[in-house]
Image (cartoon, coloured by chain):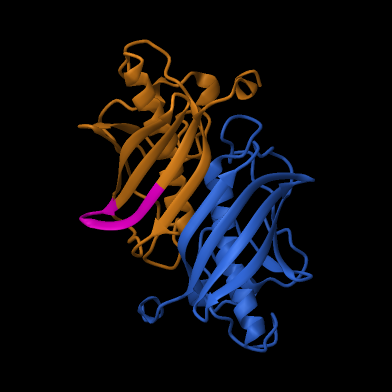
Chain colours: A orange, B blue
Amino acid sequence: MQENAAKAIQDTYPDDFAWCYGCGRLNEDGHHFRTSWEGERTVTIYTPEQKHMGIPGFVYGGLIASLIDCHGTSSAALTLHRKNGHEIGDGAEPPRFVTATLNVEFLKPTPQDVPLKVLGTVEEIHPKRWKVHSEVFAGDTLCARGEVVAVVMPSTFITK
Amino acid sequence: MQENAAKAIQDTYPDDFAWCYGCGRLNEDGHHFRTSWEGERTVTIYTPEQKHMGIPGFVYGGLIASLIDCHGTSSAALTLHRKNGHEIGDGAEPPRFVTATLNVEFLKPTPQDVPLKVLGTVEEIHPKRWKVHSEVFAGDTLCARGEVVAVVMPSTFITK
């Protein structure tokens, strides 16, 4: 379910890197998370499907973790792309990141049938290593906080 | 895909709590993670499906996070159940847990088409709060480490 109207960084990944179950546009079965800018923060909006329950009425934790993970790597990609002088859709290929660590703090049960909005703040800790602080909202309720350390994808992945 | 031969704690959850996309036996679309004992450690074995890729050939991070999350709460349930004098299938209803925090360290790319084995060590930090240290193996390769703080499910969930 694609819900962000704005151009998303995932729209511009090369085909070989567009298969992620979380955020790959070419993975027919996946979530198709899409991440873009909202002011100085990054944003991903996604409404989990009914089947993605933990207990009836609430979203299962793995979906929240996956959302924070893909939002994290994509937010790092958006930010490094901008640092390199590029914006989504200007024709330049964006950098790709992998996750080194993922931390999730579940603050409140996340209700189903509500669009979840993830807002990210990105911090450079090394030219190839970025930390993304995320908050997951259901309406006005902060349901989870996340932190992802994302690393520029090693060349060993790229030659696969 | 159910791959653990032994009795699993998830087999004994009451129907109302058996709908989790990660580990609920009644969720037809879900992963059906199943967690049991292997000696003094807890174990979950699962082979991700082809669609669960990050990039072709490797499992996406959200699946690993979900596996560690459900393995964590189920391992805490197994352990508290045993502390209370019960074993899987003795007719007693096991305790249920929710996740407070989930930390994942991605150590190596996780290959597809290989059964993943998660081994957990459970530590009591409070009668209602347990920490589960997990390792995710693909064959002999340690691909990820996880830590879950699991809390006995609050009564506000149970009355839903």
Q: Nearer the viewer, residue B141 or B71?
A: B141
- Asked which quadrant contains residue B54, the reply is top right
The quadrant in which the N terminus of chain B is found is bottom right
Q: From the viewer's perspective, is residue B57 above or below residue B71?
A: above
Residue A122: give x, y in percent of width and height: 34, 35
Which residues fall within the magenta stretch? A137-146
* Occupied quadrant, residue B50: top right
Q: Main secondary structure of the magenta part?
A: strand
- Asked if residue A142 is among those painted magenta in the image, a careful observer would answer yes
**Residue B56, position as x, y percentages in the image:** 62, 29
Identity of the residue drawn at 49% across and 57% down = B102
Specify whether residue B24 is in view.
no
At 32% from the left edge and 14% from the top edge, which residue is drawn? Answer: A86
> Residue B75 versus residue A125: which sits nearer the camera?
A125
| Residue B89 position within the rendered picture, expressed as x and y whole percent measured from the top left | 70, 82
Where in the figure is residue B120, as x and y percent of width and height? 67, 62
Looking at the rendered image, the quarter that the C terminus of chain B falls into is bottom left
Is B106 contained in the magenta span? Answer: no
Q: Is residue A45 left or right of residue A25?
A: left
Residue extending furthest top?
A: A91
- Does residue A150 appear in the picture of this structure? yes
Query: Which residue is at a point 51% across and 53% down the rendered structure image?
Result: B103
Note whether B40 is above or below A4 in the view shown. below
* Most distant residue in the front direction: A126
Q: Is residue A144 left or right of residue B29?
A: left
> At x 58% / y 24%, what residue is drawn?
A154
Q: How many marks?
A: 0
